Image (spheres, rainbow, N blue to C red):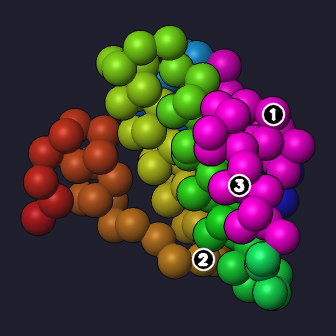
Amino acid sequence: MAAEWQNTLTEAREATGFTSEVVPRTVDGVGAALRLDHRADFYTELGALADSGGFEAFLNHWWTQALADTAPDEEAREQAIDFADVAVSLYARATGGPTSTPAEINAIVTGAEAS
């Protein structure tokens, strides 16, 4: 899975032009990158996870938030969120999970409506 994730990050960088530091998509990486006001919610939700089925969605959500929290300004924040959306969709496709269509990914990258 680590190789798929690294390939996904490369493809998402190419699709979005994202050049900032990527927060590690791990509990420790995300927890350390979150703003303090988000960190408490992150650990509360982590403690409440009842099964591993929801862990991927949990981690995807908070990884995206961590990328947004580490962005230096609003433009970088928007780019980080776009990058995360594309990366999560590409990773889901690579690992057989629920995916976004190519049109939806293109809409994320370009800011256009998906058709």
In primary-sequence order, the first of circles 1 and 3 is 1
Q: Quadrant of the N terminus?
A: bottom right
Which residue bears the numbered disc 1? Answer: 32
Distance of label 1 from label 3 (alpha carbons):
11 Å
Distance of label 3 from label 2 (alpha carbons):
23 Å
- Residue 102, position as x, y percentages in the image: 32, 59
Given the image, on which type of amino acid does mark 2 rest? Gly
- Residue 36, position as x, y percentages in the image: 69, 34
Horizontal side, residue 23 vs residue 79: left or right: right
In the image, 89 versus 56, the foreground residue is 56
In the picture, residue 52 is in which quadrant? Answer: bottom right
Q: Is residue 67 positioned above or below 5 on the image?
A: above
- Residue 85, position as x, y percentages in the image: 45, 50
Given the image, on which type of amino acid does mark 3 rest? Phe
- Residue 49, position as x, y percentages in the image: 78, 78
Which residue bears the numbered disc 3? Answer: 42
Given the image, on which type of amino acid does mark 1 rest? Ala
In primary-sequence order, the first of circles 2 and 1 is 1
Task: Name the residue furthest top.
Answer: 72
Distance of label 2 from label 1 (alpha carbons):
27 Å
In the image, 94 versus 113, the foreground residue is 113
**Element carrying mark 1:** helix
Residue at image point 81% right, 33% down: 32
Residue at image point 50% right, 12% down: 72
Depth check, mark 2 against mark 1: the one in front is 1
| Residue extent of the magenta highlight | 21-47
Q: Residues within 10 Å of mark 1 (few under 14, many from 20)?
A: some
Horizontal side, residue 43 vs residue 94: left or right: right
Depth check, mark 3 against mark 2: the one in front is 3
**Element carrying mark 3:** helix
**Element carrying mark 2:** loop
Which residue bears the numbered disc 2? Answer: 97
